[in-house]
Amino acid sequence: MMLCVIALSGMAPSFGASPERPKLVVGIVIDQMRWDYLYRYQDRYTKAGFKRMSREGFSCENTMLNYIPTYTAIGHSSIYTGSVPSIHGIAGNDFIVRATGKTMYCTEDDQVNSVGTPKEDAAVGKMSPRNLKASTITDELELATNFRAKVIGVSLKDRGSILPAGHAADAAYWFDGESGNWITSTWYRDALPAWLTEYNSTRPAERYLAKDWNTLYPIDTYVQSTPDDNVYEEPFEGNAHPLFPIKTSELVKTQGFGLIRATPHGMTMTLDVARLAIEKEQLGVDDVTDFLAVSLSSPDYIGHQFGPNSVKTEDAYLRLDKDLGDFLAYLDRQVGAGNYLVFLTADHAGAHNAQFLLDHKIPAGNWNSSNVRRGLNAHLQERFGKEKLVSSLSNYQVHFNYSQVDEGVDMNDLRAATIAYLQQVEGIAYVLEMENAAAAPVPVAVRERVVNGYNRELSGEIQIVLKPAWYSDSDRQGATHGTWNPYDSHIPLLWMGWRIAPGQTNEEVYMTDIAPTLAALLRVQMPNGCVGKPITDLLNGAKRERKK
């Protein structure tokens, strides 16, 4: 008995201080921000925005996406789960459910209703994280604090707000372009908080659009961009040319409040809501760490419409830099310098307009997926006697129409015939059968991304990999993204604030390393589908900072 008592007394727990954590974590995702934008406009950035984060914080200079396709919903999911589509289940912005053949939007949920819209059954608000099959770092923070932490997501896009905030969030808010309101769904709450209702009553989108959009500086000083009037950009509807000044005060009358998404005003309005959430929800006030997930969507809309070489893109980032500086200063005042941890990254990057590259003698090409699908179906019909055996080439994947495949069509023959046809199509570099992708004779970096992006229930059976600078349907003006190449997959990753020592690393890290790094800093469990690893260069600096 004495031995037992001694053993038990030796095992008695020691209750010390709670683990050290910041009062508030702020995640900032800039939709479609290329890594090189940190330097392309550096000479015109202020000291308070990107330069402050680079000077006072830690930069992971070689941060890559490690999956395809590189789209918004997957990016936000992968940042916050530390996982990839194969595991977390968000296989695109839209994906096709193989069992039913139906297209599913990443956050659609018919089991919830809209909150903040004129009608509760409005589709814009019937959204939730239900389709995300892994936990997020925000979920893990809630679990670690017995749900005492407050977690809120804010973005113009529903997917940019919902997927980072996770399943157990207190709220996620996004923008309804029809009503001009910031809204949510009954997944989170049955009514908007009073502070957001009051903000909506001020008609923020209408107020910002009334200011129009002109360049921040004289337009002839925008030397990093092509001339304002060019063939590579898509004008706003109703405008013959994509020229400054852009009279958003007039355009809103015909295009509605959703117009704000494709202007820098959208970023400013989003950060307004972020500030209100911090202040009104008392984030970062007590000793329990809170989390605010902010996604700035406007750069994506601007990038798609105008491309990386536009004066509009340059002006948007100069304005974003000022907004970022103001927001960091706000955090200093509201939460206290050193009391908050902020990281800034992107969900994906973006390519140059293909025609722009061709006009500068750089190889590129336009790949029309609709024409390829029609040609492929004609070929397969001749071979198998069935119409429309391929239903879609979305997400650069071949989705078969299984309702057309019966005993008369052998799937192995169908896949082989499809691959053989696609291998002859101009612009295609590789065609991989998904189930055997791990053994495909393609570069390791490409193969790994294909495997990570493949979800057996939601992806097509065959992956198409295009040649560098080739894009699906990119013959239109503007630009796009979606591939494995560095212009789409090389993103910024800056850390600043609580326990972060200044520095940088050029070691390759991945988007999926963000969540486990946060888990290490916060001393909480990694998300349950996490495949990433903590960024040790950053953590070693944080350890030295803690010892001071």
Image (cartoon, rainbow, N blue to C red):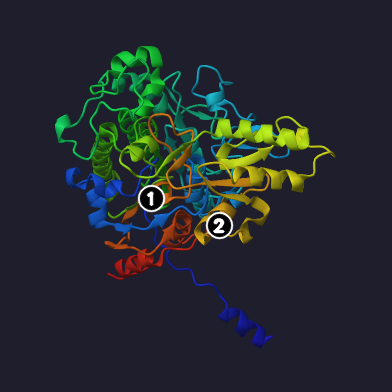
Choose mark 1 or mark 2, whichever is in front.
2
Q: Residue 447, which numbered label?
A: 2
Q: In the rendered image, which quarter contains the N terminus? A: bottom right
Whether residue 88 can be seen here: yes
Residue occupying the point 43% across, 45% down: 348
How far across and how far down the image is residue 167, in percent? 56, 43
What's the residue type where badge 1 is placed?
Ile
| Amino acid under disc 2 | Arg
Distance from label 1 to label 2 (Cα)? 20 Å
Residue 213, picture quadrant: top left
**Quadrant, the C terminus:** bottom left
Marked residue nearer the N-terminal end (1 or 2): 2
Q: Is 44 situated left or right of 335 in this image?
A: left
Q: Nearer the viewer, residue 121 or 17?
A: 121
Neighbour tally class for label 2: few under 14, some 14-19, many 20 plus, Cα within 10 Å: many
Residue 100: horizontal and vertical position, in percent?
72, 35
Left or right for 437, reference 325? right
Secondary structure, mark 1, is strand
Give the number of the disc on residue 491.
1
Residue at 63% x, 82% y: name it. Answer: 5
Q: Which disc, if any, is residue 444?
A: none
- Image: 340 above or below 314: below
